[in-house]
């Protein structure tokens, strides 16, 4: 064991460092839980000013001035003609899918948050799961064509971790095969592809401003598009189909963003650079401190593009570490480091998809492999240098004693509850 570890975790003596881990009865390294996606708040004063203002105005929803301003700001930043703010990204996806007239089958990655698939299935459209490129974790365009059938009407790419899909290749396929192309850009606000901001690609893109996202509106989402007709349909649909006071011209639903959400979004936008600086600082530190740990690979970002650095993602090569991703996550949870197994176990392993396509995994070897080895670590403005350092030291310790940790956890498996709660129960998303 290195002297560095002894220095940082003084509670751990060299000879019984592993035994002193919290999972084996030691004291947790952190008194308070460290979360993935703890909300960035921005200026509380500015937020409260805006809330007072909207209360004074008594304009709480129905496209008030803050929603208008938020939409303008997002459209400017994404470089698009239109932005339609919504109550969340799931409803924004559902409405966009409907407005773009998708039907039958739509090709999506299984390696995504389940909302991407649910937004289709909710409308009786079949999500056809496509495998990913292991280098990018994004939908693999080389595999998309093989999934196209006469029933296919569209493709939804997901910019996982904010790393853009191969937009060019997907655009070429969509044009050649006459398919609609949408992007789930829930992770990718503030990111660019080939020098252009995410938001302007395909027929439309959808952002999430959920509390756990690096820019949040408490709950929120937005669609950006350059297509005038599509934008007009989405606007109608998210407001029950109303055109004017009494005139309903379309089937619609309620996808409106509230003024208080827009107030939060606008406040966050004012601190956006600060959020990115904190995320990037944490990411760089994780990168430095984890670089020499064998079998632990940090997902990297293209330094030539804009990026929000909101996810610190590790792949654990168990053949090298001799300790599984799940065991590492369990150890971290016991230390109060709530690392997450995103996107575990993949949409195709969740209901109702698991029952519809029990053998989908056979077509998704890279997705199956990745969902068994990927995890994300706490970052954001609530996480500082000391915390990152200590998290890295725990990972270093566990990997340095991989076989020992595995053996102890496997031996104990019959008698103990897992230290981490199943995905989905733990945090909202
Ligand atoms: C890839 C992806 N798509 C869609 C969503 C849904 O976003 P929302 O919570 O705003 O509905 C999320 C949320 O975590 C996500 O990660």
Image (spheres, rainbow, N blue to C red):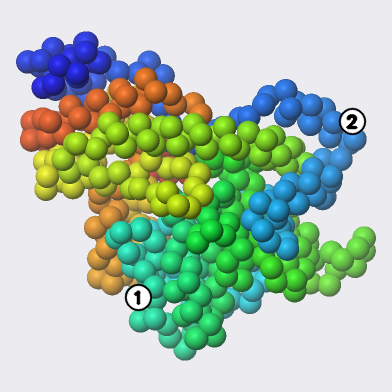
Image location (x, y in percent) of residue 292: 19, 36
Q: Residue furthest front?
A: 304
Residue 228 pos. (x, y %): 75, 71
Tell me: 16 left or right of 210: left
Q: Residue at x 35, y 58 (%)?
A: 136
CA neighbours of label 1 inside 10 A, class few (<14), some (14 to 19), many (20+): some
**Quarter of image, res 235:** bottom right
Q: Are marks 1 and 2 in contact (CB under 8 Å)?
A: no
Residue at 69 percent of width and 68 percent of height: 226
Horizontal relation, residue 313 to residue 53: left or right:
left
Q: Label 2, secondary structure: give it.
A: helix
Report which quarter residue 239 is drawn in.
bottom right
167 or 159: which is nearer to us? Answer: 167
Q: Toward the viewer: 240 or 191?
A: 191
- State the separation of the CA atoms marked 1 and 2: 55 Å
Q: Residue at x 26, y 35 (%)?
A: 290
Marks 1, 2: nearer the viewer: 1
Q: Look at the picture and state if 180 lies above or below 257.
A: below
* In-image side of 422 versus 276 (left or right): left
Q: Which residue is mark 1?
A: 142
| The N terminus - image quarter | top left
Q: Which mark is residue 56?
A: 2
Residue 293 placement: quadrant: top left
The secondary structure type at the circle numbered 1 is helix
Residue located 25% across and 16% down the image:
8
Can residue 78 be seen from the camera position used here?
Answer: yes
| Above-or-below relation of 207 to 316 | below
């Amino acid at each position: 064991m290195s002297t560095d570890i002894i220095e940082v975790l003084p509670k751990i003596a060299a000879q019984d460092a592993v035994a002193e881990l919290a999972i084996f009865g030691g004291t947790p390294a952190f008194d308070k839980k460290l979360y993935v996606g703890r909300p960035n708040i921005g200026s509380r004063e500015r937020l409260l000013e805006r809330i007072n203002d909207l209360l004074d105005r008594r304009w709480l929803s129905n496209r008030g001035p803050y929603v208008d301003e938020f939409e303008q700001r997002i459209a400017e930043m994404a470089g698009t003609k239109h932005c339609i703010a919504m109550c969340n990204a799931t409803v924004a996806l559902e409405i966009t899918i409907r407005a773009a007239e998708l039907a039958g089958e739509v090709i999506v990655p299984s390696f995504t948050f389940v909302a991407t698939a649910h937004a289709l299935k909710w409308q009786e459209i079949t999500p056809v799961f496509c495998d990913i490129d292991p280098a990018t974790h994004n939908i693999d365009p080389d595999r998309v064509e093989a999934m196209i059938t006469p029933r296919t009407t569209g493709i939804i790419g997901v910019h996982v971790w904010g790393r853009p899909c191969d937009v060019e290749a997907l655009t070429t396929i969509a044009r050649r095969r006459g398919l609609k192309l949408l992007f789930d850009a829930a992770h990718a606000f503030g990111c660019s592809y080939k020098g252009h901001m995410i938001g302007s690609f395909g027929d439309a893109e959808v952002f999430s401003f959920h509390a756990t996202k690096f820019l949040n509106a408490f709950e929120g989402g937005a669609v950006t598009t350059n297509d005038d007709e599509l934008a007009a349909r989405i606007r109608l649909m998210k407001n029950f189909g109303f055109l004017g006071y009494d005139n309903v011209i379309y089937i619609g639903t309620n996808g409106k963003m509230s003024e208080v959400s827009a107030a939060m979004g606008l406040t966050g936008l004012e601190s956006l650079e600060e959020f990115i600086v904190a995320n990037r600082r944490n990411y760089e530190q994780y990168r430095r401190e984890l670089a020499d740990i064998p079998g632990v690979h940090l997902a990297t970002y293209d330094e030539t593009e804009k990026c929000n650095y909101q996810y610190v993602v590790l792949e654990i090569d168990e053949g090298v570490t001799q300790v599984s991703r799940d065991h590492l996550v369990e150890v971290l949870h016991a230390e109060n480091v709530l690392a997450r197994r995103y996107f575990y176990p993949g949409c195709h392993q969740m209901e109702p998809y698991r029952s519809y396509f029990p053998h989908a995994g056979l077509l998704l070897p890279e997705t199956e492999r990745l969902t068994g080895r990927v995890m994300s670590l706490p970052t954001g403005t609530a996480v500082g240098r000391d915390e990152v350092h200590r998290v890295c030291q725990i990972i270093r310790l566990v990997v340095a004693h991989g076989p020992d940790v595995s053996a102890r956890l496997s031996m104990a498996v019959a008698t103990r509850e897992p230290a981490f709660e199943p995905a989905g129960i733990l945090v909202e998303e």
